[in-house]
Image (cartoon, rainbow, N blue to C red):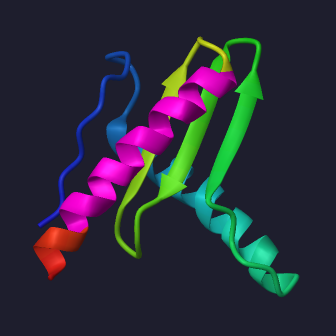
Amino acid sequence: MSSCSCYLPRDVHVETFATLSATLLGASEVVYTGLNKEPPRRVVEESDAGNLVAVGLGKKAMLVAMSTQGVDKLTEGIEVATANIREVLRKESG
């Protein structure tokens, strides 16, 4: 079962946002793997318009968050959320 929950402006297509976020995360994993390095835990994009953090949660899940708040505050929130989500996923698979 897969699900997607998000709060995006009405004119943003959820599928496009999810696909491009997955591409961003996947591309960074390919770069690191090509350098014989562990893949990154997260990808952070900073912009004057806001910040985006994408975190992989296994082979078929990821969490992407955007905020106009500082990247440090966003990253802290993502770390808490991903720990909780990983725990739920672990219990479901185990």
Q: Residue at x 66, y 49 (%)?
A: 43
Q: Nearer the viewer, residue 58 or 8?
A: 58
The residue lying at 32 percent from left, 17 percent from top is: 10
Left or right relative to 72: residue 19: left
Residue at far right of view: 35
Q: Position of residue 88 (x, y in %)?
A: 19, 60
First to last magenta residue range: 71-89
Residue 48 drawn at (x, y percent): 76, 13
Picture quadrant of residue 70 = top right
Say which residue appears at 24% left-offset and 46% top-offset: 4
Q: How many marks?
A: 0
Q: Position of residue 7 (x, y in %)?
A: 31, 23
Whether residue 67 appears in magenta in the rendering, the answer is no
Quarter of the image with the C terminus is bottom left
Quick check: 83 above or below 28?
A: above
| Image coords of residue 63 (percent x, y) | 41, 48
Residue 39 visible to the viewer: yes
Q: Relative to residue 81, is residue 29 depicted above or below?
A: below
Q: Residue at x 68, y 12 (%)?
A: 49
